[in-house]
Amino acid sequence: MSTVILAEKPDQARDYAAAFKKSTKKNGYIEVEDSRFFTGKAFITWGFGHLVELAEPKAYKEEWAKWNLKDLPIFPEKFKFQVAEDKKKQFNIVKKLLKESSEIIIATDPDREGENIARSIINLAGASNKPTKRLWANSLLPEPLRKAFADLKDGKDYVNMYVEAQTRQISDWLVGMNLSRLYTLLLQGQGVHESFSVGRVQTPTLYLIYQRKQEIENFVSKPFFELFANLETQDGTLTLKHKNRLDTPQQVKELLAKHRISEENQATISEVKKEEKHTGAPKLFSLSKLQSKANKQWKYSPQQVLETVQSLYDKKILSYPRTDTQYIGEGEFEYLKANLAHYQKTVGCNFEVAYNEPRKKYVDSSKVQEHYAIIPTQKIPTESEINDLSEMQKTIYFEVVRNTIAMFAPDYEYEETQITASINDLLFHASGKVERKKGWKELFSSDAQDDDKEEQGKLPPVNKGESYKAKMNVKQGKTKPPKPYTEGQLINMMITAGKAVDDDDDKEILKETEGIGTEATRASIIETLKTQNYISINKNIVEVTTKGEILCKAVESTLLASPSMTANWEKHLKKLGSGEGTQSNFLRNIQKLIDKLLNDAPVKIQGGELLSFIDEVKDQFKEKKKPKGKKKFKTRKKVSPK
């Protein structure tokens, strides 16, 4: 009896081997021995990420090798999978091991894409009939790995996850291969000599950025007026504001006349409400939350954050990166509590533990389905290991540690004061905040800026019933346009499918939509938009390029411009992952979309607004002259199908 453990990449395979009693490196695999887990021989082998991929269109029909409108749509009857030429040697090693094995353990990354990678290899190797187990581990440390190998899952439980991932892969291929050719050829016919990558996720994301650009350009600023009352107290000036904005000077005049208010008046304090308040530490990090925080604070791109967390996971000091939850289980809480003193020393912040027991805000096993939040592992890096980290790695690691141990720290405590004053029955309000105890905020140096705001929020002491002279002040302002997105805000925009919600709220909207893309793919989608020259980043501000604007105008009013449609697709894909629906039905709907666009796009691109815009900018996209005396070959830029 022999067991094959299929890892996603060589480094992962070596980490697995370190968990066993004996290992011997071979050509393309590692032989391991450990009677606690295996009764016979065991071999760890690996892919190089996507060892198996979907075949190019030319593998189905010769005419599909060339880009011609008359050959669209490209709908293969049965999809073909192939091994890239430079990966065939390793695939053949894996295939031989799988074919000779009596049992397979899928040990690729514990997520949908990892499942797809493994089963694509197994299927192409002709080993899909073998008994299969699934390793599910959130840490690469030897002890957690041994626990995971002792608790292998039934491979059948993860088949639907594979179906979901493969359906996403095929649908992205169909959209990319058909619609990239369609829009590239149509726009080149109008003199725009560029390749246009179109994707099920990337194009709606681009359109949301374009939509914000339009909102800013079309914004018409309007004046508004606000009423302030400045009360002179013994301890300084107390400034209060009337809650309603007014649209015109005439409205201001009428309101003041109605309440017989002149420039100087007598104001009576009608209410003073003081309340002691406290707030707990923020939730733990999901990948998107960490990406948003790191972009806002240090201007790191989402891709940089993902790559950095991945590198720290590979070093075994952070947990699995591609997680969409902000919760941990009780087992994780217990090891974090046991190691708390070490984590405190690592970030140089000692505090008295206020919470020794799990709280639902952070610890909830019912909300940990595949992975828990991003937290430090049980491995405490030495000072030397910390020094060997890059600056970005240190920054991200320390931030995750601080954010994690903050749940053990005391609450942030403050006094909030609400004051209401009446001037001839017209009410004015002021609020202030005074810090009582810093609590968990001691962990975060960035709160130094907040301290200033809190001190500025301290109000002069007044009592109900007291009267003060009040001077009126009318301030004029103008409404401001929406701000362009930052890279970090793009992640939130994709999660909410473009719907405006407050970053710090527990967004009810997330219960209604699956958003655009997945936790694992959003950063790469943003990178694709950059590499395709659809967006540019200037001082962390995202701008749509001329090329991006051309494509957005071309897809305007189609389903490709609909983030809610894309979010709905993600919702149905996730249903496949839970065993609802079928792959064939989903792909039929994708084909209907493609058919509709093949019919509608040529007519739309002839529209006057798009053509006039192209006429303005097409000098930027002139066809490059080919060198004389050389044979001319038709070339295309590679386009991303996502």
Image (cartoon, rainbow, N blue to C red):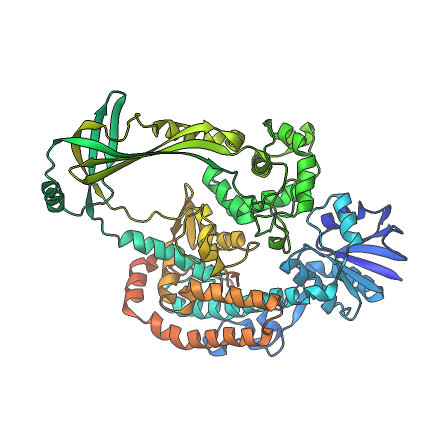
Query: Which quadrant of the figure has residue 499?
Result: bottom left
Front residue of 174/575: it is 575
**Relative image position of residue 288 (x, y in whole percent):** 52, 49
Q: In the rendered view, would you say 604 is above or below 22?
A: below
Residue 195, visible in the rendered structure:
no
Residue 454, visible in the rendered structure:
yes
Q: Quadrant of the N terminus?
A: bottom right
Query: Which quadrant of the figure has residue 285?
Result: top right
**Relative image position of residue 250 (x, y in whole percent):** 10, 46
**Relative image position of residue 240 (x, y in whole percent):** 25, 34
Front residue of 428/515: it is 428
**Relative image position of residue 357 (x, y in whole percent):** 63, 40
Q: In the rendered view, would you say 58 is above or below 329?
A: below
Q: In the rendered view, would you say 118 is above or below 588?
A: above
Front residue of 267/21: it is 267
Q: Is 389 placed left or right of 502 in the picture?
A: right
Q: In the rendered view, would you say 623 is above or below 327?
A: below
